[in-house]
Amino acid sequence: MKRNTLNRQIRSLLSLLVILWIAACQGSILDLSGSSSIPKQSTPATDCRLIKHTMGETCVPVNPQRVVVLTALDSVLALGIQPVGAATLDGGKFRSFLPDQTRSIESVGLIGQPSLEKIVRLKPDLILATYPRELYDQLSRIAPTVIFWDEDAAYLHWQDGFKAYANTLGKTQEADRILNQYQQRISEFRLQMGDRLSKTQVSLVNFFAADVRLYLKQVFGGQILEEIGLPRPPSQDKNEWSIENLSIEAIPQMAGDAIFLILGGHEPSKLKQFTSHPLWSQLEAVQAGRVYEVSNEIWIAGATPVDANLLLDDLFRSLIENWK
């Protein structure tokens, strides 16, 4: 009888040990697979905040000290955060208007193609990005990672993406100040435009090497124009991204009181093919000398308050200072 009792106790103890061993193995598997949004390197729960984002939820440090930024670096700099590392443009360079602010920031590869090895060496306590989503699991094993995908409905508007960055970094007051200053500039622009504001239709056209596009209301430039209250031509007044692959016959759809040619590294032959056509010369904006060349990097690829203010600079210069 005693022997049976002893055997049951031994079996119970062995079962308990097996359960504990399985649980320990599962914990290791979770860490290796990256399925947990809070990796081993993350700050203890008492010192972090839970942030919801495109890929789920991540507990980020309350006061991150070693931030790596894979997109929208100028947003982070504007909020007063100096990252230890960031992704760069083609050619391994940061944006040209940020030379003084980026001297101490180490490149971690190109935007969309970051080097995981370089990121690991920097020992970040937070990784912040809008993409690439496919690297999320790997990045999360390095440090707490937050991704606000810019095609996610919650972050489609540039201000929502900026506010999400600010909230993650604990800089909501700074973000409010920056956006208030931006709104003040919009108010000044509206004041100077006067009655012309509601009557000036703005057309956005882009000439690629093998494509010609009209940009609509969802692109960055379209969002800014809508915030300001500048109307679009009927062909462009749609809550979509763009109309692509336009032919010469579509030139009349480019009509507006002002036309912004959104250029940036495109072959000049496509531009010349359209702008030398008789249909182009018949456009009212062309005849009035109201065609303005602007940067694709700002008007379309932009996503930050820095871009918004640079775009406003273009509008002040073209629609007020140089208006004919």
Image: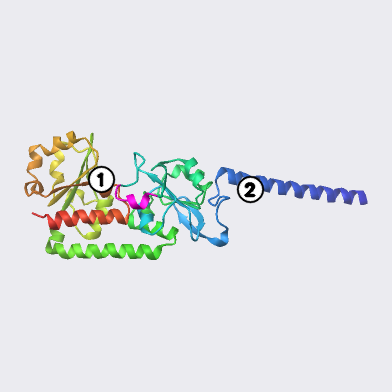
In this view, 122 is above or below 47: above
The label number, if any, that marks residue 27 in the structure image: 2
Residue 200 visible, this angle: no
Q: Report the front residue among 243 and 28.
A: 28
Q: Where is residue 157 in the image (x, y as percent from the top left)?
A: 33, 55
Residue at 34 percent of width and 46 percent of height: 94
Question: Image check: 13 left or right of 141?
Answer: right
Which portion, as a residue range, is magenta? 96-103
Residue at 49 percent of width and 47 percent of height: 122
Question: Image check: 78 left or right of 264?
Answer: right
Residue 237 visible, this angle: yes
Tell me the element at label 1: helix
| Magenta run includes residue 99 | yes
Residue mark closest to the camera, 2 vs 1:
1
Place residue 274 in its image quadrant.
Answer: top left
Upstream in sequence: badge 2 or badge 1: 2
Total number of numbered discs in the rendering: 2
Q: Say few, some or many: other residues with alpha carbon within 10 Å of mark 1 (under 14 / 14 to 19 / 20 or more).
A: some
Q: Quadrant of the C terminus?
A: bottom left
Question: Image check: 24 left or right of 271?
Answer: right
Question: Image check: 20 left or right of 155?
Answer: right
